[in-house]
Image: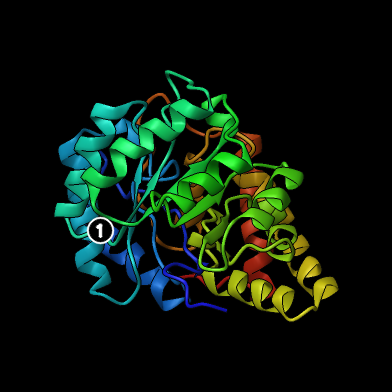
Amino acid sequence: MAELMFRGLIPAFPTPLTADGAIDEANLAAIVDYQIARGASGLVPVGGTGEANSFSLADRRRIVEITVTATAGRVPVIAGVLDPGLGGALESGRAYREAGADGLMVIPPYYARPDQEGTLRYFRVLAPELKLPIVFYDNPYRTGMVTTPATIARLEQEGLIIGMKASSTDLYHFDQLARLVSERFCLLSGQDTLFVEQVMLGAKGGVLTSASLLPGYWSEVQKRAEQGQVKEALAMQGRLNPLMDALFAEQFPETVRRAFALIGLPIGRSLPPVGALSAAAEARLAEAIGALVADGTLAPV
């Protein structure tokens, strides 16, 4: 297999904040170290889990700068460009490049909801200006639009993207795409609950939210799946189902913040409109974290 630019477990992680909502720079460096020490192959700051759209451009650039500095070249940093249109995406991408990002994870222009040709036009303008490797962020649940496998393959063929994060439960779409792209394409799972299935269909790793807590565990899941130990890989993935159900139940990504607090790394509360968890959700999350700590799967800080 050709060497890939990005592969393995690349967590999308929350942005630590102080009580007044400012960037907590010390804990941002600490959460970077936590993930790398536990096996992350890369990091995605200012993605959806990082609440990118809640911050100003200046704050987002600073988050990327701190992440790059704390990473110190140990793993690549792929900054999330979640802007709804061209002007914002260009500003964000340029700022992240100047901040030292190794790549960009770019969502298509979801406010305009273009047709397939419109998506091609968008990336034909964007990619040459940003001058960094681009991972296409396919997330139809958030964008309300479906980019076809043929369009994504065309983006690779034209040299506009080098990979894709697939945040979708549509395994047929994923299978079709895997058959169209090259071996060098960094096809990444973005669906925690279907990671093994997407690896079996050709994913070379994943940008997973739960991997911010357990990157090494997920790396072992990937290894088992790639070696044909599918039953074992699915069993390992299934052990995390209570955690994943709790993380995505309500008030995401406040759930992820609370999970870090429960293992000894408090990183503040989410910004509006995200609110606090209900008592039931808090109890559900605590039970899931407690079970993983008790059986040694998750080690407290």
Q: Position of residue 212 (x, y in %)?
A: 48, 60
Please state if 48 lies on the left or on the right of 138 as rendered: left
Kind of residue indicated by mark 1: Ala
Residue 262 to residue 76: above or below:
above
Residue at horizontal 65%, vertical 45%?
246
Q: Is residue 289 visible?
A: yes
Number of numbered tags placed on the structure image: 1
Please state if 146 lies on the left or on the right of 47 as rendered: right
In this view, the residue in front, 272 or 96, is 96
In this view, the residue in front, 213 or 280, is 213
Q: For numbered disc 1, what is the local secondary structure?
A: loop
In this view, the residue in front, 204 or 183, is 183
Residue 287 to residue 93: above or below:
below
Q: Is residue 22 visible?
A: no
Residue at horizontal 48%, vertical 52%?
157
* Disc 1 target residue: 101
Which quadrant does the C terminus fall into? bottom left
Q: Position of residue 287 (x, y in %)?
A: 67, 54
Would you call the spot at circle 1 few (<14 residues within 10 Å), some (14-19), or many (20 or more)? many
Residue sitting at the far front: 158
Residue 215 to residue 113: above or below:
below
In this view, the residue in front, 173 or 267, is 173
Task: Name the quadrant containing residue 50.
Answer: top left
Residue sitting at the far right: 231
Residue at horizontal 39%, vertical 62%?
43
Task: Name the quadrant containing residue 37.
Answer: bottom left
Residue sitting at the far top: 112
Give the colour scheme shown: rainbow
Q: Position of residue 130 (x, y in %)?
A: 24, 47
Q: Position of residue 175 (x, y in %)?
A: 72, 52
Please state if 254 lies on the left or on the right of 242 as rendered: left
Which quadrant does the N terminus fall into? bottom right
